[in-house]
Image: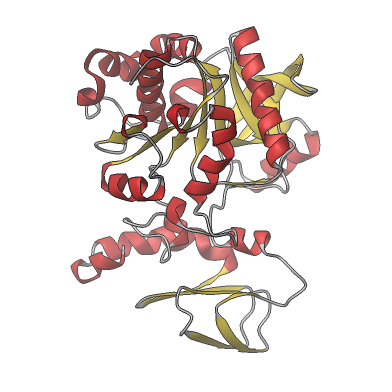
Amino acid sequence: MSQSTTPTLIPVILAGGKGERFWPLSRRSRPKQFLCLDGGDRSLLQATADRLLATSSGWENLWVVTAAHLESGMQAQLPELPDANLLVEPEGRDTAPALAWSTLEVAKRYGEDAVLGFFPADHWIADLDIFQATLAAAAEMAVKDDVIVTLGIAPAYASTGYGYIEQGDALGEYGEGYPAYKVSRFTEKPDRQTAEEFIQSGRFSWNGGMFVFKASTVLQELEKHAPEILNPLKEKGIAAYGEVPKNSIDYALMEKTTKATVMPVKFGWDDLGDWGAIDRLRKSDAPNVELAQHVGLDTAGSLLYSTSDDDLIVTIGMEDTVIVRDGNVTLVVKKDRTQDIKQVLKTLREMPAHQDLL
Protein backbone atom coordinates (compact mmCIF):
# COMPACT_ATOMS: atom_id res chain seq x y z
CA MET A 1 0.00 0.00 0.00
CA SER A 2 1.38 3.42 -0.88
CA GLN A 3 2.37 5.93 1.80
CA SER A 4 -0.50 8.21 2.82
CA THR A 5 -0.59 11.63 4.34
CA THR A 6 -1.08 11.30 8.06
CA PRO A 7 -4.73 12.05 8.88
CA THR A 8 -5.80 14.17 11.82
CA LEU A 9 -6.85 11.08 13.73
CA ILE A 10 -6.34 7.38 12.98
CA PRO A 11 -9.04 5.40 14.79
CA VAL A 12 -8.38 1.88 16.03
CA ILE A 13 -11.39 -0.24 17.02
CA LEU A 14 -10.83 -2.87 19.70
CA ALA A 15 -13.16 -5.69 18.64
CA GLY A 16 -12.02 -8.85 20.36
CA GLY A 17 -14.48 -8.87 23.26
CA LYS A 18 -16.92 -11.64 24.11
CA GLY A 19 -19.92 -9.76 25.51
CA GLU A 20 -20.77 -12.70 27.76
CA ARG A 21 -23.37 -10.80 29.77
CA PHE A 22 -25.52 -10.67 26.61
CA TRP A 23 -25.66 -14.45 26.40
CA PRO A 24 -27.50 -16.31 24.92
CA LEU A 25 -27.75 -13.74 22.13
CA SER A 26 -24.00 -13.15 22.28
CA ARG A 27 -22.01 -16.32 21.58
CA ARG A 28 -18.36 -17.12 20.81
CA SER A 29 -18.90 -16.92 17.04
CA ARG A 30 -21.45 -14.09 17.30
CA PRO A 31 -20.17 -11.71 20.01
CA LYS A 32 -21.93 -8.58 21.17
CA GLN A 33 -20.20 -6.31 18.65
CA PHE A 34 -21.83 -8.27 15.81
CA LEU A 35 -25.33 -7.67 17.19
CA CYS A 36 -27.89 -4.94 16.47
CA LEU A 37 -29.00 -3.86 19.92
CA ASP A 38 -29.97 -0.20 19.55
CA GLY A 39 -32.98 -0.62 17.29
CA GLY A 40 -31.11 0.07 14.04
CA ASP A 41 -30.07 -2.22 11.20
CA ARG A 42 -26.33 -1.84 11.83
CA SER A 43 -24.39 -3.95 14.29
CA LEU A 44 -22.57 -2.25 17.15
CA LEU A 45 -19.29 -2.77 15.29
CA GLN A 46 -20.68 -1.31 12.06
CA ALA A 47 -22.14 1.66 13.93
CA THR A 48 -18.76 2.28 15.57
CA ALA A 49 -17.04 2.20 12.17
CA ASP A 50 -19.66 4.56 10.73
CA ARG A 51 -18.99 7.09 13.50
CA LEU A 52 -15.24 6.98 13.00
CA LEU A 53 -15.04 7.08 9.22
CA ALA A 54 -15.62 10.83 9.14
CA THR A 55 -12.61 11.39 11.38
CA SER A 56 -10.35 8.85 9.67
CA SER A 57 -10.54 10.18 6.10
CA GLY A 58 -12.05 6.90 4.94
CA TRP A 59 -11.51 3.16 5.20
CA GLU A 60 -7.80 3.34 4.37
CA ASN A 61 -7.11 4.94 7.75
CA LEU A 62 -9.49 2.91 9.93
CA TRP A 63 -7.98 -0.03 11.83
CA VAL A 64 -9.52 -2.94 13.73
CA VAL A 65 -7.97 -5.34 16.25
CA THR A 66 -9.82 -8.63 16.70
CA ALA A 67 -9.45 -12.25 17.82
CA ALA A 68 -8.43 -15.04 15.46
CA HIS A 69 -11.75 -16.91 15.69
CA LEU A 70 -13.61 -13.71 14.69
CA GLU A 71 -11.54 -12.87 11.60
CA SER A 72 -13.99 -14.16 8.98
CA GLY A 73 -16.95 -12.63 10.80
CA MET A 74 -15.12 -9.30 10.98
CA GLN A 75 -14.47 -9.36 7.24
CA ALA A 76 -18.16 -10.05 6.62
CA GLN A 77 -19.17 -7.23 8.95
CA LEU A 78 -16.73 -4.69 7.45
CA PRO A 79 -16.04 -5.78 3.86
CA GLU A 80 -14.69 -2.32 2.95
CA LEU A 81 -11.89 -2.53 5.52
CA PRO A 82 -8.50 -3.17 3.85
CA ASP A 83 -6.98 -6.51 4.82
CA ALA A 84 -3.81 -4.78 6.02
CA ASN A 85 -5.87 -2.74 8.51
CA LEU A 86 -7.33 -5.81 10.23
CA LEU A 87 -4.96 -6.89 13.00
CA VAL A 88 -5.72 -10.42 14.18
CA GLU A 89 -4.54 -11.50 17.63
CA PRO A 90 -3.57 -15.19 17.77
CA GLU A 91 -4.78 -15.20 21.38
CA GLY A 92 -6.40 -12.69 23.69
CA ARG A 93 -3.91 -10.87 25.94
CA ASP A 94 -6.20 -8.01 27.12
CA THR A 95 -6.01 -4.39 26.02
CA ALA A 96 -2.38 -3.48 26.77
CA PRO A 97 -0.79 -5.83 24.19
CA ALA A 98 -3.54 -4.97 21.69
CA LEU A 99 -2.89 -1.25 22.06
CA ALA A 100 0.89 -1.65 21.99
CA TRP A 101 0.91 -3.87 18.89
CA SER A 102 -1.55 -1.77 16.92
CA THR A 103 0.31 1.45 17.81
CA LEU A 104 3.53 -0.08 16.52
CA GLU A 105 1.81 -1.16 13.28
CA VAL A 106 0.21 2.26 12.71
CA ALA A 107 3.54 3.97 13.41
CA LYS A 108 5.23 1.79 10.76
CA ARG A 109 2.89 3.19 8.14
CA TYR A 110 2.48 6.80 9.25
CA GLY A 111 5.42 7.49 11.54
CA GLU A 112 5.49 8.10 15.28
CA ASP A 113 3.87 11.55 14.90
CA ALA A 114 0.62 9.81 13.96
CA VAL A 115 -2.32 10.59 16.24
CA LEU A 116 -4.36 7.53 17.22
CA GLY A 117 -7.71 7.07 18.87
CA PHE A 118 -8.71 3.78 20.53
CA PHE A 119 -12.38 2.85 20.80
CA PRO A 120 -14.31 -0.23 21.98
CA ALA A 121 -16.39 -1.82 19.23
CA ASP A 122 -19.53 -2.36 21.26
CA HIS A 123 -20.57 0.95 22.83
CA TRP A 124 -23.59 3.12 22.07
CA ILE A 125 -22.82 6.79 21.39
CA ALA A 126 -25.28 9.57 20.57
CA ASP A 127 -24.77 13.15 19.34
CA LEU A 128 -22.43 12.48 16.42
CA ASP A 129 -21.47 16.13 15.89
CA ILE A 130 -20.46 16.50 19.54
CA PHE A 131 -18.58 13.20 19.38
CA GLN A 132 -16.53 14.35 16.40
CA ALA A 133 -15.85 17.76 17.97
CA THR A 134 -14.65 15.99 21.13
CA LEU A 135 -12.24 13.82 19.15
CA ALA A 136 -10.88 16.89 17.38
CA ALA A 137 -10.30 18.61 20.73
CA ALA A 138 -8.63 15.50 22.16
CA ALA A 139 -6.36 15.19 19.11
CA GLU A 140 -5.40 18.84 19.46
CA MET A 141 -4.47 18.31 23.09
CA ALA A 142 -2.53 15.11 22.40
CA VAL A 143 -0.35 16.88 19.83
CA LYS A 144 0.04 20.20 21.65
CA ASP A 145 0.79 18.87 25.13
CA ASP A 146 2.30 15.44 24.39
CA VAL A 147 -0.21 13.66 26.66
CA ILE A 148 -2.52 10.66 26.64
CA VAL A 149 -6.12 11.86 26.60
CA THR A 150 -8.84 9.69 28.12
CA LEU A 151 -12.46 10.54 27.38
CA GLY A 152 -14.34 10.72 30.69
CA ILE A 153 -18.05 9.90 30.85
CA ALA A 154 -20.31 11.97 33.12
CA PRO A 155 -21.62 9.49 35.73
CA ALA A 156 -25.38 8.99 35.52
CA TYR A 157 -25.56 7.13 38.83
CA ALA A 158 -23.27 5.61 41.48
CA SER A 159 -22.22 2.56 39.48
CA THR A 160 -20.03 -0.09 41.11
CA GLY A 161 -19.34 -1.72 37.75
CA TYR A 162 -17.28 1.04 36.11
CA GLY A 163 -13.81 2.40 36.71
CA TYR A 164 -13.59 6.05 37.78
CA ILE A 165 -11.17 8.85 36.87
CA GLU A 166 -10.57 11.71 39.28
CA GLN A 167 -9.93 15.15 37.80
CA GLY A 168 -6.81 16.90 39.04
CA ASP A 169 -5.46 20.29 37.97
CA ALA A 170 -7.23 22.04 35.09
CA LEU A 171 -5.14 22.16 31.91
CA GLY A 172 -7.21 24.57 29.84
CA GLU A 173 -9.71 24.23 27.02
CA TYR A 174 -9.22 22.65 23.63
CA GLY A 175 -11.12 22.59 20.34
CA GLU A 176 -14.52 24.20 20.66
CA GLY A 177 -14.35 24.81 24.40
CA TYR A 178 -13.63 21.33 25.79
CA PRO A 179 -11.89 21.51 29.19
CA ALA A 180 -9.33 18.92 30.21
CA TYR A 181 -7.63 17.98 33.46
CA LYS A 182 -4.62 16.12 34.70
CA VAL A 183 -5.65 12.71 36.01
CA SER A 184 -5.36 12.58 39.79
CA ARG A 185 -6.10 8.86 40.08
CA PHE A 186 -7.91 5.89 38.59
CA THR A 187 -10.18 3.76 40.78
CA GLU A 188 -11.46 0.42 39.53
CA LYS A 189 -15.03 -0.59 40.42
CA PRO A 190 -15.51 1.00 43.86
CA ASP A 191 -18.03 -0.16 46.45
CA ARG A 192 -21.42 1.56 46.65
CA GLN A 193 -20.53 4.08 49.34
CA THR A 194 -17.32 5.11 47.59
CA ALA A 195 -19.12 5.46 44.26
CA GLU A 196 -21.71 7.71 45.87
CA GLU A 197 -18.96 9.86 47.39
CA PHE A 198 -17.32 10.13 43.97
CA ILE A 199 -20.57 11.32 42.41
CA GLN A 200 -21.21 13.88 45.13
CA SER A 201 -17.72 15.36 44.77
CA GLY A 202 -18.28 16.28 41.10
CA ARG A 203 -14.63 15.49 40.32
CA PHE A 204 -15.02 12.01 38.83
CA SER A 205 -15.80 10.58 35.41
CA TRP A 206 -16.48 7.01 34.35
CA ASN A 207 -13.62 5.44 32.45
CA GLY A 208 -15.12 4.70 29.02
CA GLY A 209 -11.98 3.02 27.65
CA MET A 210 -11.44 5.60 24.88
CA PHE A 211 -7.98 7.12 24.39
CA VAL A 212 -6.35 9.64 22.03
CA PHE A 213 -2.56 10.11 21.78
CA LYS A 214 0.46 10.46 19.53
CA ALA A 215 2.13 7.16 18.74
CA SER A 216 5.46 8.47 20.04
CA THR A 217 3.92 9.43 23.39
CA VAL A 218 2.48 6.01 24.13
CA LEU A 219 5.49 4.10 22.80
CA GLN A 220 7.81 6.11 25.04
CA GLU A 221 5.56 5.59 28.06
CA LEU A 222 5.21 1.86 27.37
CA GLU A 223 9.00 1.64 27.09
CA LYS A 224 9.21 3.22 30.54
CA HIS A 225 6.34 1.47 32.34
CA ALA A 226 5.64 -1.76 30.43
CA PRO A 227 8.79 -2.83 28.53
CA GLU A 228 7.83 -6.47 29.06
CA ILE A 229 4.91 -5.84 26.70
CA LEU A 230 6.39 -3.37 24.21
CA ASN A 231 9.88 -4.73 23.60
CA PRO A 232 8.97 -8.29 22.50
CA LEU A 233 6.35 -6.86 20.12
CA LYS A 234 8.82 -4.31 18.79
CA GLU A 235 11.46 -6.99 18.18
CA LYS A 236 9.34 -9.91 16.91
CA GLY A 237 5.96 -8.43 16.03
CA ILE A 238 2.95 -10.71 16.25
CA ALA A 239 5.24 -13.74 16.73
CA ALA A 240 5.88 -12.48 20.28
CA TYR A 241 2.22 -12.33 21.26
CA GLY A 242 2.29 -15.48 23.33
CA GLU A 243 5.29 -14.16 25.29
CA VAL A 244 3.84 -10.90 26.52
CA PRO A 245 1.93 -10.79 29.81
CA LYS A 246 -1.82 -10.46 29.80
CA ASN A 247 -2.72 -7.02 31.15
CA SER A 248 -5.13 -4.14 30.64
CA ILE A 249 -3.90 -0.76 29.43
CA ASP A 250 -5.23 0.80 32.63
CA TYR A 251 -3.03 -1.33 34.87
CA ALA A 252 -0.03 -1.59 32.55
CA LEU A 253 0.21 2.10 31.68
CA MET A 254 -2.52 4.56 32.61
CA GLU A 255 -2.20 4.14 36.38
CA LYS A 256 1.59 4.64 36.14
CA THR A 257 2.17 7.37 33.58
CA THR A 258 2.36 11.06 34.48
CA LYS A 259 0.96 11.95 31.05
CA ALA A 260 -2.62 10.80 31.69
CA THR A 261 -5.26 13.49 31.18
CA VAL A 262 -9.05 13.36 31.14
CA MET A 263 -11.43 15.27 28.90
CA PRO A 264 -15.06 15.04 30.12
CA VAL A 265 -17.40 14.40 27.21
CA LYS A 266 -20.80 15.85 26.39
CA PHE A 267 -22.18 13.17 24.07
CA GLY A 268 -24.56 10.42 25.13
CA TRP A 269 -22.87 7.13 25.98
CA ASP A 270 -23.65 3.63 27.21
CA ASP A 271 -21.26 0.69 27.29
CA LEU A 272 -24.15 -1.73 26.71
CA GLY A 273 -22.62 -3.93 29.36
CA ASP A 274 -25.60 -6.20 29.99
CA TRP A 275 -29.29 -6.69 29.24
CA GLY A 276 -30.19 -3.74 31.45
CA ALA A 277 -28.71 -1.46 28.81
CA ILE A 278 -31.49 -2.38 26.37
CA ASP A 279 -33.97 -1.31 29.00
CA ARG A 280 -32.20 2.06 29.28
CA LEU A 281 -31.98 2.64 25.53
CA ARG A 282 -35.58 1.72 24.77
CA LYS A 283 -37.27 3.03 27.89
CA SER A 284 -40.82 4.29 27.31
CA ASP A 285 -44.08 4.65 29.15
CA ALA A 286 -44.94 1.04 28.33
CA PRO A 287 -44.88 -1.35 31.30
CA ASN A 288 -42.30 -3.58 29.59
CA VAL A 289 -39.70 -3.48 26.82
CA GLU A 290 -41.04 -5.99 24.32
CA LEU A 291 -38.74 -7.16 21.53
CA ALA A 292 -40.72 -10.33 21.00
CA GLN A 293 -44.31 -11.49 20.70
CA HIS A 294 -45.47 -11.22 24.28
CA VAL A 295 -48.69 -11.87 26.15
CA GLY A 296 -48.43 -10.89 29.79
CA LEU A 297 -50.61 -10.85 32.86
CA ASP A 298 -49.54 -8.74 35.83
CA THR A 299 -46.09 -8.30 34.28
CA ALA A 300 -44.15 -5.04 34.62
CA GLY A 301 -40.64 -3.65 34.41
CA SER A 302 -39.48 -6.60 32.31
CA LEU A 303 -37.53 -7.07 29.09
CA LEU A 304 -38.78 -9.71 26.61
CA TYR A 305 -36.50 -10.56 23.68
CA SER A 306 -36.65 -13.24 20.99
CA THR A 307 -34.63 -13.73 17.82
CA SER A 308 -37.55 -15.49 16.11
CA ASP A 309 -40.76 -13.79 15.04
CA ASP A 310 -42.52 -17.14 15.48
CA ASP A 311 -41.78 -17.42 19.20
CA LEU A 312 -44.37 -16.32 21.76
CA ILE A 313 -43.37 -15.43 25.31
CA VAL A 314 -46.15 -15.67 27.90
CA THR A 315 -45.62 -14.27 31.40
CA ILE A 316 -47.73 -14.17 34.55
CA GLY A 317 -46.79 -12.16 37.61
CA MET A 318 -43.28 -11.27 36.46
CA GLU A 319 -41.53 -8.10 37.65
CA ASP A 320 -38.12 -6.65 36.80
CA THR A 321 -37.17 -9.76 34.83
CA VAL A 322 -35.22 -10.36 31.63
CA ILE A 323 -36.44 -13.19 29.39
CA VAL A 324 -34.42 -13.93 26.26
CA ARG A 325 -35.17 -16.65 23.73
CA ASP A 326 -32.54 -17.57 21.11
CA GLY A 327 -32.81 -20.84 19.23
CA ASN A 328 -32.97 -23.66 21.74
CA VAL A 329 -31.94 -21.54 24.74
CA THR A 330 -34.13 -19.50 27.06
CA LEU A 331 -32.67 -17.20 29.71
CA VAL A 332 -34.78 -16.01 32.64
CA VAL A 333 -32.99 -13.69 35.09
CA LYS A 334 -33.86 -10.88 37.47
CA LYS A 335 -32.57 -7.54 36.21
CA ASP A 336 -30.32 -7.06 39.20
CA ARG A 337 -28.64 -10.44 38.62
CA THR A 338 -27.62 -10.16 34.95
CA GLN A 339 -23.96 -9.82 35.95
CA ASP A 340 -24.16 -13.43 37.17
CA ILE A 341 -24.61 -14.75 33.63
CA LYS A 342 -20.84 -15.22 33.50
CA GLN A 343 -21.08 -17.65 36.40
CA VAL A 344 -23.58 -19.77 34.48
CA LEU A 345 -21.30 -19.82 31.44
CA LYS A 346 -18.49 -21.19 33.60
CA THR A 347 -20.76 -24.08 34.48
CA LEU A 348 -21.71 -24.68 30.84
CA ARG A 349 -18.03 -24.83 29.84
CA GLU A 350 -17.66 -27.82 32.13
CA MET A 351 -20.56 -29.63 30.43
CA PRO A 352 -19.40 -31.23 27.13
CA ALA A 353 -22.98 -31.71 25.93
CA HIS A 354 -23.60 -27.96 25.95
CA GLN A 355 -20.46 -26.55 24.31
CA ASP A 356 -22.49 -25.56 21.26
CA LEU A 357 -24.46 -23.13 23.41
CA LEU A 358 -21.44 -20.99 24.23
Query: Which residue is at the front of the view, 186 or 74?
Result: 74
- Can the viewer see residue 150 in this picture? yes
Q: Quadrant location of the N terminus?
A: top left
Q: Is residue 317 above or below residue 127?
A: below
Q: Position of residue 280 (x, y in %)?
A: 67, 60
Q: Position of residue 340 (x, y in %)?
A: 46, 61
Q: Is residue 229 above or below residue 153?
A: above
Q: Position of residue 178 (x, y in %)?
A: 76, 24
Q: Residue at x 24, y 25 (%)?
A: 238
| Quarter of the image where one finds residue 328 | bottom left
Q: Quadrant location of the C terminus?
A: bottom left
Q: Position of residue 288 (x, y in %)?
A: 67, 76
Q: Is residue 280 left or right of residue 179?
A: left
Q: Is residue 91 above or below residue 73?
A: above
Q: Residue at x 45, y 50 (%)?
A: 33
- Can the viewer see residue 153 in this picture? no
Q: Is residue 9 above or below residue 114?
A: below
